């Protein structure tokens, strides 16, 4: 399946691109992260600690075990703080 993958804030800075189209066989978000980490060191550096990275599928926050099924977009970003 093809997914639009979007990176925000320091995740984007570590990976080096704001977005990309990814062809994947991943079943869930965790599988996608594992697949991306095998691509290049920059992905592994961005996803080294997934406890500090939030994930959204089609703009809805999800857990790492969320299925990709019909998703069109996956976004990775650090937790937001407000003020």
Image (cartoon, rainbow, N blue to C red):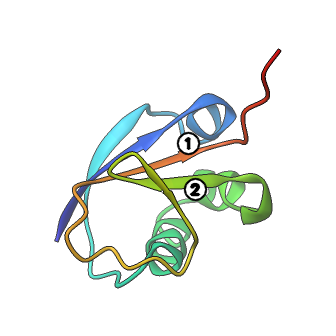
What residue is drawn where x is 24% and y is 77%? Answer: 69
Residue 67 lies left or right of residue 41; in this view the side is left
Say few, some or many: other residues with alpha carbon within 10 Å of mark 2 (under 14 / 14 to 19 / 20 or more).
many
Q: Quadrant of residue 32?
A: bottom left
Q: Is residue 51 above or below residue 54?
A: below
Residue 38 lies left or right of residue 42; in this view the side is left
- In terms of secondary structure, where does tag 2 sit? helix
What residue is drawn where x is 63% and y is 52%? Answer: 54
| Position in image of residue 31 (x %, y %) | 47, 81
Q: Quadrant of residue 35?
A: bottom left
| Quadrant position of the N terminus in the picture | bottom left
- What is the number of the mark on residue 43? 2
The answer to which of 56 and 29 lies nearer the viewer is: 56
Tag 1 residue: 15
Q: What's the distance in space between the residues labelled 1 and 2, CA to CA?
A: 6 Å
Q: Are marks 1 and 2 in contact (CB under 8 Å)?
A: yes
The answer to which of 3 and 20 lies nearer the viewer is: 3
| Quadrant position of the C terminus in the picture | top right
Q: Is residue 17 above or below residue 37?
A: above
What residue is drawn where x is 58% and y is 56%? Answer: 43
What residue is drawn where x is 52% and y is 73%? Answer: 38
The answer to which of 4 and 34 lies nearer the viewer is: 4
| Position in image of residue 66 (x %, y %) | 46, 76
| Position in image of residue 76 (x %, y %) | 53, 48
Q: Is residue 74 above or below residue 19?
A: below
Residue 67 lies left or right of residue 29; in this view the side is left
């Amino acid at each position: 399946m093809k997914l639009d993958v979007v990176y925000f804030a320091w995740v984007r800075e570590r990976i080096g691109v704001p977005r990309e189209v990814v062809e994947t066989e991943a079943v869930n978000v965790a599988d996608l992260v594992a697949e991306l980490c095998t691509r290049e060191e920059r992905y592994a550096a961005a996803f080294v600690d997934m406890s500090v990275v939030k994930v959204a599928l089609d703009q809805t926050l999800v857990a790492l075990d969320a299925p990709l099924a019909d998703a069109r977009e996956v976004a990775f970003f650090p937790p937001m703080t407000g003020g």
